[in-house]
Amino acid sequence: MSATAGTKRAQRNRTRKPKFQADLAPFEDRIVRSLKEELQVSSNSDFMSDAVALFQWAVGERKRGHKIFSESTTGEKEVLVLPRLERVAPEAVLPHVNLDWNEKQLASLIDLTQGEPAQPSEALVKLMRG
């Protein structure tokens, strides 16, 4: 093999995009073709790129604990539940709270966290002993 042929092959390999192939059932193939026609997408590559972008967005939303739903013009909502998406959803949605601390409050918090732990009160000790 000549140096020129090796260089050309190396350049082709660098510019080659990863290939994706899927074995679809005939019904799924008809759905993909119908969607491509409805969305006016001519290539499988463009269709796949859009589908991946949509799925990536959905995964991000579920990771943040957001629900994904559609809303009709009358306000009726339908939540999307897709088992694969639910795998990435947090087990419990924790509330997000933004606290605006002033200097005095921050200083008090620092003192509290750096100080010795408080001893339990007699009432607490009695309660814990039953």
Image: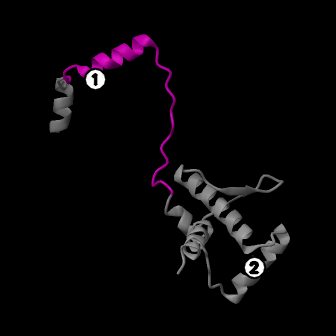
22, 62: nearer the viewer: 22
Q: Residue at x 84, y 69 (%)?
A: 40
Element marked by disc 2: helix
Which label is found at residue 31?
A: 2
Q: CA distance from mark 2 to mark 1?
A: 60 Å
Task: Name which quarter of the figure residue 50 lies in.
Answer: bottom right
Q: Give left or right: position of 102 versus 124.
A: right
Label 1 is placed on what type of residue? Thr
Task: Name which quarter of the figure residue 80 lies in.
Answer: bottom right
Q: Is residue 64 above or below residue 14?
A: above
* Dot 2 crowding, Cα within 10 Å, few <14, some 14–19, many 20+: few
For the stretch drawn in magenta, the main secondary structure is loop
Q: Residue at x 62, y 80 (%)?
A: 21
Q: Position of residue 67 (x, y in %)?
A: 61, 54
* Dot 1 crowding, Cα within 10 Å, few <14, some 14–19, many 20+: few
As for residue 22 lying within the magenta part, the answer is: no
Q: Residue at x 76, y 83 (%)?
A: 30
Q: Position of residue 56 (x, y in %)?
A: 60, 59
Q: Residue at x 52, y 53 (%)?
A: 63
Q: Is residue 26 above or below residue 84?
A: below
Q: Position of residue 120 (x, y in %)?
A: 18, 26
Q: Which residues are magenta?
A: 89-118
Choose mark 2 or mark 1, whichever is in front. Answer: 2
Q: Is residue 68 above or below residue 115?
A: below
Q: Position of residue 8 (x, y in %)?
A: 60, 72
Task: Name which quarter of the figure residue 126 lies in.
Answer: top left
Label 2 is placed on what type of residue? Ile
